[in-house]
Amino acid sequence: MLHQSLRDLAEQAPLSTSTATARGVLREAQQLLRNALDHRTPETALTGWFSGVVRDTLRCPAVASTVTLTGAHARGDALPSSPVEWFGEDAAFAGLLRSAGLEVGGDTAVTDAARIDAGLVPSPTPQRPLLELAVAHRPPALQIADGLPDPDMPADIPATLLQPISDVARWAAPGARSTLDRLSAGLEAGALTEDEAEALAQAWETALALQFRRWADRVDKQDVTLGDLPALHRSAYGAAARMVAGVLRSLAGRHGVALA
Protein backbone atom coordinates (compact mmCIF):
# COMPACT_ATOMS: atom_id res chain seq x y z
CA MET A 1 0.00 0.00 0.00
CA LEU A 2 1.39 3.40 -0.99
CA HIS A 3 1.63 6.11 1.66
CA GLN A 4 -1.23 8.59 1.71
CA SER A 5 1.07 11.43 0.62
CA LEU A 6 1.82 9.55 -2.60
CA ARG A 7 -1.85 8.91 -3.26
CA ASP A 8 -2.71 12.56 -2.57
CA LEU A 9 -0.12 13.85 -5.03
CA ALA A 10 -1.26 11.37 -7.67
CA GLU A 11 -4.76 12.84 -7.35
CA GLN A 12 -3.38 16.37 -7.76
CA ALA A 13 -1.32 15.63 -10.89
CA PRO A 14 -4.17 15.66 -13.46
CA LEU A 15 -5.75 18.76 -11.90
CA SER A 16 -2.93 21.32 -12.12
CA THR A 17 -4.22 24.57 -13.63
CA SER A 18 -0.93 26.48 -13.77
CA THR A 19 2.57 25.66 -14.95
CA ALA A 20 3.91 26.50 -11.51
CA THR A 21 1.56 23.97 -9.90
CA ALA A 22 2.46 21.29 -12.45
CA ARG A 23 6.17 21.94 -11.86
CA GLY A 24 5.57 21.74 -8.12
CA VAL A 25 3.85 18.37 -8.50
CA LEU A 26 6.81 16.94 -10.43
CA ARG A 27 9.32 18.29 -7.93
CA GLU A 28 7.34 17.10 -4.93
CA ALA A 29 7.01 13.68 -6.56
CA GLN A 30 10.79 13.32 -6.48
CA GLN A 31 10.99 14.31 -2.82
CA LEU A 32 8.22 11.88 -1.92
CA LEU A 33 10.11 9.15 -3.77
CA ARG A 34 13.15 9.76 -1.56
CA ASN A 35 10.98 9.51 1.53
CA ALA A 36 9.32 6.35 0.24
CA LEU A 37 12.67 4.73 -0.47
CA ASP A 38 13.80 5.55 3.06
CA HIS A 39 10.69 3.74 4.31
CA ARG A 40 11.44 0.72 2.09
CA THR A 41 8.47 1.05 -0.24
CA PRO A 42 8.92 -1.53 -3.04
CA GLU A 43 10.69 0.05 -6.01
CA THR A 44 8.33 -1.64 -8.47
CA ALA A 45 5.39 0.14 -6.85
CA LEU A 46 7.24 3.46 -7.00
CA THR A 47 8.00 3.22 -10.72
CA GLY A 48 4.33 2.67 -11.48
CA TRP A 49 3.33 5.58 -9.24
CA PHE A 50 5.91 7.98 -10.64
CA SER A 51 5.11 7.06 -14.24
CA GLY A 52 1.47 7.82 -13.55
CA VAL A 53 2.28 11.22 -12.06
CA VAL A 54 4.22 12.21 -15.19
CA ARG A 55 1.52 10.86 -17.52
CA ASP A 56 -1.23 12.72 -15.66
CA THR A 57 0.80 15.94 -15.58
CA LEU A 58 1.11 15.70 -19.37
CA ARG A 59 -2.71 15.83 -19.65
CA CYS A 60 -3.48 18.32 -16.87
CA PRO A 61 -5.17 21.64 -17.84
CA ALA A 62 -1.94 23.59 -17.42
CA VAL A 63 -0.05 21.40 -19.91
CA ALA A 64 -2.71 19.75 -22.09
CA SER A 65 -0.07 18.29 -24.37
CA THR A 66 -1.06 16.28 -27.43
CA VAL A 67 2.17 14.26 -27.65
CA THR A 68 2.05 10.50 -27.14
CA LEU A 69 4.29 9.13 -24.41
CA THR A 70 6.37 6.05 -25.07
CA GLY A 71 9.25 4.32 -23.31
CA ALA A 72 9.46 3.74 -19.57
CA HIS A 73 6.83 6.31 -18.60
CA ALA A 74 4.27 4.82 -20.97
CA ARG A 75 4.99 1.31 -19.66
CA GLY A 76 4.86 2.32 -15.99
CA ASP A 77 8.54 1.51 -15.46
CA ALA A 78 10.01 4.99 -15.02
CA LEU A 79 12.55 6.12 -12.45
CA PRO A 80 13.20 9.85 -11.95
CA SER A 81 16.39 9.35 -13.97
CA SER A 82 14.53 7.79 -16.93
CA PRO A 83 14.33 10.09 -19.98
CA VAL A 84 10.76 11.12 -20.80
CA GLU A 85 10.17 10.12 -24.43
CA TRP A 86 7.28 10.83 -26.76
CA PHE A 87 6.10 11.13 -30.34
CA GLY A 88 5.51 14.68 -31.51
CA GLU A 89 6.77 18.17 -30.69
CA ASP A 90 6.12 20.04 -27.47
CA ALA A 91 8.81 22.49 -26.41
CA ALA A 92 6.72 23.76 -23.50
CA PHE A 93 6.36 20.29 -22.00
CA ALA A 94 10.08 19.65 -22.46
CA GLY A 95 10.84 22.93 -20.70
CA LEU A 96 8.52 22.04 -17.82
CA LEU A 97 10.24 18.69 -17.33
CA ARG A 98 13.71 20.23 -17.37
CA SER A 99 12.67 22.93 -14.91
CA ALA A 100 11.47 20.17 -12.58
CA GLY A 101 14.83 18.40 -12.82
CA LEU A 102 13.72 15.52 -15.04
CA GLU A 103 15.50 14.00 -18.02
CA VAL A 104 14.05 14.78 -21.45
CA GLY A 105 14.32 12.25 -24.27
CA GLY A 106 11.84 14.20 -26.35
CA ASP A 107 10.55 13.26 -29.78
CA THR A 108 11.86 9.75 -30.31
CA ALA A 109 12.28 7.55 -33.37
CA VAL A 110 9.13 5.71 -34.44
CA THR A 111 10.34 2.12 -34.01
CA ASP A 112 8.18 -0.96 -33.52
CA ALA A 113 9.31 -1.15 -29.89
CA ALA A 114 8.43 2.49 -29.23
CA ARG A 115 5.03 2.13 -30.91
CA ILE A 116 4.23 -0.94 -28.83
CA ASP A 117 5.19 0.82 -25.60
CA ALA A 118 3.00 3.76 -26.60
CA GLY A 119 0.03 1.43 -27.10
CA LEU A 120 -0.22 2.28 -30.80
CA VAL A 121 -0.12 -1.32 -32.07
CA PRO A 122 -3.52 -3.07 -31.81
CA SER A 123 -3.26 -6.62 -30.43
CA PRO A 124 0.52 -6.91 -30.85
CA THR A 125 2.09 -10.37 -30.90
CA PRO A 126 5.66 -11.53 -30.25
CA GLN A 127 7.85 -10.75 -33.25
CA ARG A 128 11.35 -12.04 -33.98
CA PRO A 129 12.87 -8.52 -34.45
CA LEU A 130 11.87 -7.69 -30.88
CA LEU A 131 13.77 -10.73 -29.60
CA GLU A 132 16.75 -9.86 -31.80
CA LEU A 133 16.74 -6.40 -30.22
CA ALA A 134 16.82 -7.92 -26.75
CA VAL A 135 19.66 -10.29 -27.64
CA ALA A 136 21.64 -7.37 -29.09
CA HIS A 137 21.33 -5.59 -25.73
CA ARG A 138 22.41 -8.53 -23.55
CA PRO A 139 24.90 -7.72 -20.76
CA PRO A 140 28.56 -7.94 -21.79
CA ALA A 141 30.70 -10.82 -20.60
CA LEU A 142 32.49 -10.21 -17.31
CA GLN A 143 36.03 -8.95 -17.78
CA ILE A 144 38.72 -10.57 -15.65
CA ALA A 145 41.88 -8.89 -14.34
CA ASP A 146 44.40 -10.92 -12.31
CA GLY A 147 41.84 -13.65 -11.81
CA LEU A 148 39.18 -11.31 -10.40
CA PRO A 149 36.37 -9.26 -11.94
CA ASP A 150 37.93 -6.17 -13.50
CA PRO A 151 37.08 -3.22 -11.21
CA ASP A 152 37.37 -0.86 -14.18
CA MET A 153 34.59 -2.61 -16.13
CA PRO A 154 31.61 -0.27 -16.67
CA ALA A 155 28.50 -1.11 -14.64
CA ASP A 156 25.76 0.65 -16.61
CA ILE A 157 22.61 -0.49 -14.84
CA PRO A 158 20.07 1.00 -17.30
CA ALA A 159 21.89 -0.27 -20.39
CA THR A 160 22.99 -3.71 -19.19
CA LEU A 161 20.03 -4.66 -16.98
CA LEU A 162 16.92 -2.51 -17.35
CA GLN A 163 17.00 -2.25 -21.14
CA PRO A 164 17.52 -5.92 -22.06
CA ILE A 165 14.95 -7.08 -19.50
CA SER A 166 12.34 -4.64 -20.80
CA ASP A 167 13.24 -5.72 -24.35
CA VAL A 168 12.66 -9.40 -23.56
CA ALA A 169 9.40 -8.63 -21.76
CA ARG A 170 8.17 -6.58 -24.73
CA TRP A 171 8.87 -9.48 -27.07
CA ALA A 172 7.29 -12.07 -24.77
CA ALA A 173 4.01 -10.20 -24.19
CA PRO A 174 3.80 -6.91 -26.10
CA GLY A 175 0.10 -6.57 -25.36
CA ALA A 176 0.74 -6.02 -21.65
CA ARG A 177 2.07 -2.77 -20.20
CA SER A 178 4.68 -2.84 -17.44
CA THR A 179 7.76 -5.03 -17.70
CA LEU A 180 6.74 -7.24 -14.77
CA ASP A 181 3.23 -7.64 -16.19
CA ARG A 182 4.75 -8.58 -19.53
CA LEU A 183 7.01 -11.18 -17.93
CA SER A 184 4.01 -12.75 -16.17
CA ALA A 185 1.97 -12.70 -19.37
CA GLY A 186 4.90 -14.10 -21.34
CA LEU A 187 5.09 -17.01 -18.91
CA GLU A 188 1.36 -17.67 -19.25
CA ALA A 189 1.64 -17.56 -23.05
CA GLY A 190 4.53 -19.99 -23.09
CA ALA A 191 7.06 -17.55 -24.52
CA LEU A 192 9.13 -17.82 -21.32
CA THR A 193 9.74 -20.76 -19.04
CA GLU A 194 9.06 -20.41 -15.34
CA ASP A 195 12.80 -20.25 -14.60
CA GLU A 196 13.34 -17.58 -17.26
CA ALA A 197 10.46 -15.39 -16.09
CA GLU A 198 11.53 -15.73 -12.46
CA ALA A 199 15.18 -14.89 -13.23
CA LEU A 200 14.24 -11.83 -15.27
CA ALA A 201 11.78 -10.58 -12.65
CA GLN A 202 14.39 -10.98 -9.92
CA ALA A 203 17.03 -9.21 -12.01
CA TRP A 204 14.55 -6.41 -12.79
CA GLU A 205 13.80 -5.80 -9.12
CA THR A 206 17.53 -5.84 -8.34
CA ALA A 207 18.28 -3.37 -11.12
CA LEU A 208 15.52 -1.00 -9.96
CA ALA A 209 16.79 -1.11 -6.39
CA LEU A 210 20.38 -0.40 -7.49
CA GLN A 211 19.43 2.44 -9.83
CA PHE A 212 17.03 4.02 -7.33
CA ARG A 213 19.82 3.99 -4.75
CA ARG A 214 22.20 5.72 -7.14
CA TRP A 215 19.51 8.32 -7.86
CA ALA A 216 18.81 8.83 -4.14
CA ASP A 217 22.56 9.29 -3.58
CA ARG A 218 22.61 11.82 -6.48
CA VAL A 219 25.26 9.90 -8.43
CA ASP A 220 23.02 8.41 -11.13
CA LYS A 221 24.42 10.77 -13.82
CA GLN A 222 28.00 9.71 -13.14
CA ASP A 223 29.72 6.90 -15.03
CA VAL A 224 30.20 3.92 -12.73
CA THR A 225 32.50 0.91 -12.77
CA LEU A 226 32.34 -2.32 -10.80
CA GLY A 227 34.98 -0.96 -8.46
CA ASP A 228 32.82 2.07 -7.64
CA LEU A 229 29.95 -0.05 -6.34
CA PRO A 230 29.77 -1.12 -2.68
CA ALA A 231 30.57 -4.81 -2.27
CA LEU A 232 26.93 -5.87 -1.78
CA HIS A 233 25.77 -3.82 -4.77
CA ARG A 234 28.62 -5.18 -6.90
CA SER A 235 27.62 -8.73 -6.03
CA ALA A 236 23.94 -8.06 -6.74
CA TYR A 237 24.75 -6.37 -10.06
CA GLY A 238 26.97 -9.26 -11.16
CA ALA A 239 24.38 -11.88 -10.25
CA ALA A 240 21.62 -9.98 -12.08
CA ALA A 241 23.77 -9.52 -15.19
CA ARG A 242 24.59 -13.24 -15.26
CA MET A 243 20.91 -14.16 -14.98
CA VAL A 244 19.90 -11.83 -17.80
CA ALA A 245 22.72 -12.99 -20.05
CA GLY A 246 21.84 -16.62 -19.35
CA VAL A 247 18.17 -16.14 -20.24
CA LEU A 248 19.08 -14.33 -23.45
CA ARG A 249 21.48 -17.10 -24.47
CA SER A 250 18.73 -19.64 -23.85
CA LEU A 251 16.15 -17.69 -25.86
CA ALA A 252 18.59 -17.06 -28.68
CA GLY A 253 19.38 -20.76 -28.94
CA ARG A 254 15.71 -21.76 -28.79
CA HIS A 255 14.69 -19.34 -31.55
CA GLY A 256 17.78 -19.47 -33.73
CA VAL A 257 18.93 -15.89 -33.06
CA ALA A 258 22.65 -15.39 -33.60
CA LEU A 259 24.72 -14.10 -30.71
CA ALA A 260 27.01 -11.30 -31.90
Image: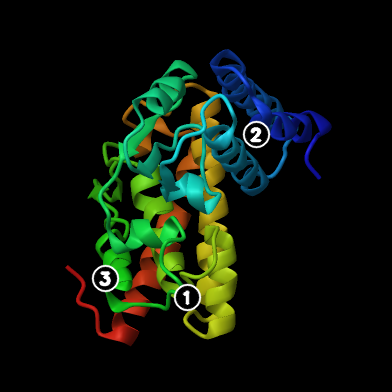
Q: Earlier in the sequence, mark 3 or mark 2?
A: 2
* Residue drawn at point x = 48 percent, y = 33 percent: 230
Q: Quadrant of residue 158?
A: top left
Q: Earlier in the sequence, mark 3 or mark 1?
A: 1
Q: Which residue is mark 2?
A: 14
Q: Secondary structure at mark 1?
A: loop
* Residue drawn at point x = 61 percent, y = 42 percent: 52
Q: In the image, which disc is placed on residue 8?
A: none
Horizontal arrangement in the rendering, residue 155 relative to residue 58 (left or right): left
Q: Position of residue 105 (x, y in %)?
A: 34, 36
Considering depth in this image, is 220 or 55 the residue closer to the camera?
A: 55
Q: Which residue is mark 3?
A: 132
Q: Secondary structure at mark 3?
A: helix
Considering depth in this image, is 97 or 195 the residue closer to the camera?
A: 97
Is residue 211 visible in the rendered structure shown here?
A: yes
* Residue drawn at point x = 55 percent, y = 26 percent: 216
Q: Position of residue 221 (x, y in %)?
A: 37, 26
Q: Which residue is mark 1?
A: 123
* Residue 205 in the image: above or below residue 20: below
Q: Position of residue 48 (x, y in %)?
A: 62, 46
User: Farthest residue toward the top?
Assistant: 20
